[in-house]
Image (cartoon, grey):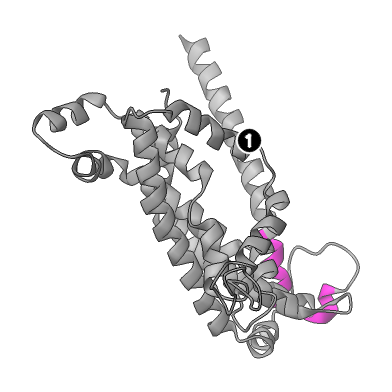
Amino acid sequence: MNKRKRNSQISNGLNMVMLIFFGIVFTLPFYWTVLTAIRPNSEIFSSGLKLFTTNPTFEHFVKAFNVIPFMEYTKNTLLITVIIIATNLIFCSLAGYAFAKIDFKFRKFIYRLLLFSVMIPGAVLMIPQFLVLARFPLAGGNNLMGQGGSGFSGNLLGVVLPTAISVFNIMFMRASFISMPDELGEAARLDGASELQIFYHVYLPQAKPALATLAVFCFQAGWNSFMWPNIILRSGDFKVLSQGLQSFTTNNNVDYGPMMAAAVCATIPVIIIFICAQKYFIRGIAFSGSKE
């Protein structure tokens, strides 16, 4: 008995050491970003690895707010992120419920097509997506043939439309709904409830942990998105935070201090959201990882 208890203590100790090690590994890049943001330029470009600074300064934060319209870019990024969260929560939860609980024709075939689409790298689809949105008929001054204007490029809809729904998010919500008993829906159908009523009143309240997790995923993806906004918003005045960070790079020269200061400010909302939704996030991962 003592031997078993001792082995358990050793195992718990090793697990704790591993958790501390990986915690340090994953936290170190953010710590280095914060450290660079408060270091004077003389320390940033000095040789050697210094884990502390003796002369902290906030001049980089002041410069970051003066170089780019930080509040305007933050407002634009927040607007895009809120729309992405709302559309994904609505459409992906509906689609996930349909694939999990409704037996319709070609359900398995359509779901397999969605799975195949996940195998296509997202970078491959960016140019076709841009051409479709830029040449969308009757949008942005285009005629019926999609010519003469800019379509959805350079505006809010150009960023939001391709990200309004995600195959991964549909699969995530489907896994959550599959873990719930079918008997609940069958009982509601016997009482005369429609599928929308069953979805909204029976299954959706139980999916709150998964929805909270999905909201965190969408917030992080929308807030940190860089490649697609940089492509679709290259023209026009509508810009987001991730594009603003490019303002500190000119002719292959990088102003690291202000860039890191802006990056720290842009990261804070993600950290706050994750801390607030941490309980639901962990529960949602546990639910969606259960067996079908």
The image quadrant of residue 276 is bottom left
Residue at 36% x, 31% y is 100
Q: Which residue is mark 1?
A: 18
Is residue 38 highlighted in magenta? yes
The residue lying toward the viewer, choosing from 80 and 285, is 80
Q: Position of residue 59 (x, y in %)?
A: 69, 87
Q: Position of residue 127 (x, y in %)?
A: 72, 58
Disc 1 residue type (three-letter): Met
Q: Is residue 212 left or right of residue 230?
A: left
Please tell me in which quadrant of the rendered image residue 116 appears.
Answer: top right
Visible in this render: residue 39? no
**SS assignment at label 1:** helix
Identify which residue is drawn at 72% across, 50% down: 124
**Does the magenta segment cover residue 234?**
no
Q: Residues within 10 Å of mark 1 (few under 14, many from 20)?
A: few
Residue farthest toward the left in the current orientation of the protein: 191
